[in-house]
């Protein structure tokens, strides 16, 4: 699976991936590959007071109004 759109649903306060027209809900602790340019970087999705990803030793907050490209 390559290059799926990850988006935030504010009503459900959860991130989703669009897979063949269906919403697949992502959960805290789930491992995904986050695309930065053409590079797929392994990361883990986490939730504290807001959603963020962990890439190696670094943590990045996710912007709820943005969409990201991910794969599994």
Image (spheres, helix red, strand yellow):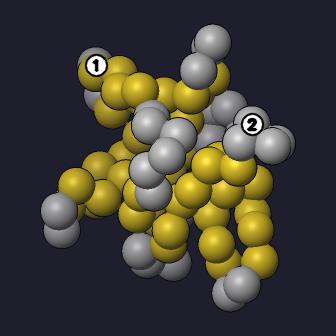
Could you say which quadrant of the image residue 37 lies in? bottom left
Identify the element where label 2 is drawn: loop
Q: Position of residue 24 (x, y in %)?
A: 75, 63
Label annotation for residue 68:
none
Q: Which residue is at the front of the view, 66 or 22?
A: 66
Q: Residues within 10 Å of mark 1 (few under 14, many from 20)?
A: few
Q: Residues within 10 Å of mark 2 (few under 14, many from 20)?
A: few
The residue identified by callout 2 is 13
Q: Residue at x 28, y 19 (%)?
A: 57
Placement of 43 over or under 23, stated as above or below: above
Placement of 17 over or under 27, stated as above or below: below
Could you say which quadrant of the image residue 14 lies in? top right
Spatial CA distance of label 1 from label 2 is 26 Å
Q: Which residue is at the front of the view, 57 or 36?
A: 36
The residue identified by callout 1 is 57
Q: Position of residue 36 (x, y in %)?
A: 22, 55
């Amino acid at each position: 699976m390559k290059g799926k759109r990850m988006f935030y649903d504010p009503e459900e306060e959860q991130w989703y991936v669009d897979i063949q027209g269906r919403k697949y809900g992502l959960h805290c602790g789930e491992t995904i590959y986050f695309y930065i340019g053409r590079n797929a970087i392994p990361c883990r999705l986490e939730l504290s007071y807001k959603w963020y990803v962990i890439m190696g030793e670094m943590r990045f907050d996710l912007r709820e109004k943005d969409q990201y490209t991910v794969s599994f």
